[in-house]
Image: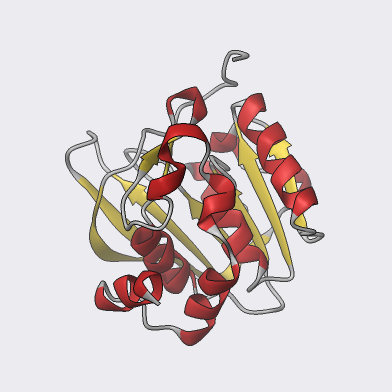
Amino acid sequence: MRFLFALRSRGVTDKRVLTAMEKVDRGAFVRHYFHDRAYDDMPLPIACGQTISQPSVVGLMTQALNVTSRDKVLEIGTGSGYQAAVLAHLARRVYTVDRHARLVREAREIYAALDFTNITAVIADGSHGLADQAPFDRILVTAAAEDPPGPLLAQLKIGGIMVLPVGQSDAVQSLIRVTRTESGYDYDELLPVRFVPLVEGLGREE
């Protein structure tokens, strides 16, 4: 209840999103020293120099994405695997991509243990998206770029929504929502955030 109250108090009000987050045990995605902080509303370190986002940010990003049960979703930045698990309760199919092989392998193990059958985790350079599965109804990016990457914009369906952080430094970033229309793209600025940078190429084996 404390976990859900923290989400609501920070603006996560969509009932479907709250239900999805109630179903996903964040503790399953937080390992070692930080396990006892898994239910606090704070980001935590994970392997490969990455972080698991604080739950309220996960909730706000998911809420902004407005996922429906028919949607095929692409997530860039698997990380711990937590965000994709939340999305999997809302979408038809989730593809999640990370440049770090270790993170993808560990996320796959968790998904198998928790019996998620609608998540496909892929080791790849997320800045290029996942062209062989495009187009996508929704795209969520959990790392910050200076501008929305062109390949990701191109892989979004007409009427589709992408939510991502943008900014030129880790100190000044904004979460934005991009909606693809028949004539181009509409942009909405949502809130200030801090994310790791979106890096091109594959990570070195850990």
Horizontal relation, residue 88 to residue 51: left or right:
right
Q: Quadrant of the C terminus?
A: top right
Q: Residue furthest bottom?
A: 15
**Residue lying at 71% horizontally and 33% vertically, measured from the top left:** 105
Seen from the viewer's position, the closer of residues 64 and 115 is 115
User: In the figure, is residue 178 to the left or right of 114?
Assistant: left
Residue toward you, 131 or 169: 169
Residue 10 visible? yes
Q: Which residue is nearer to you in this view: 156 or 89? A: 89
| Residue extending furthest toward the left | 171
**Residue 103 location (% of width, % of height):** 61, 32
Instruction: Work out which quarter of the rendered image holds the N terminus and state it.
Output: bottom left
- Please name whichever residue, 13 or 159, is drawn nearer the observer in this view of the structure: 13
Q: Residue at x 60, y 71 (%)?
A: 23
**Image quadrant of residue 89?**
bottom right
Residue 193 in percent (x, y) is at: 26, 51
The residue drawn where x is 51% and y is 27% is 47
Picture colour scheme:
secondary structure
Q: How many numbered discs sit on the rendered protein?
A: 0
Q: Is residue 66 left or right of residue 148?
A: right
Above or below: residue 128 compared with residue 9: above
Residue 30 versus residue 137 in the image, above or below: above
- Report if residue 137 is visible in the image: no
Q: Is residue 117 above or below residue 158?
A: above
Looking at the picture, how far across and down is residue 119, in whole percent?
Answer: 74, 55
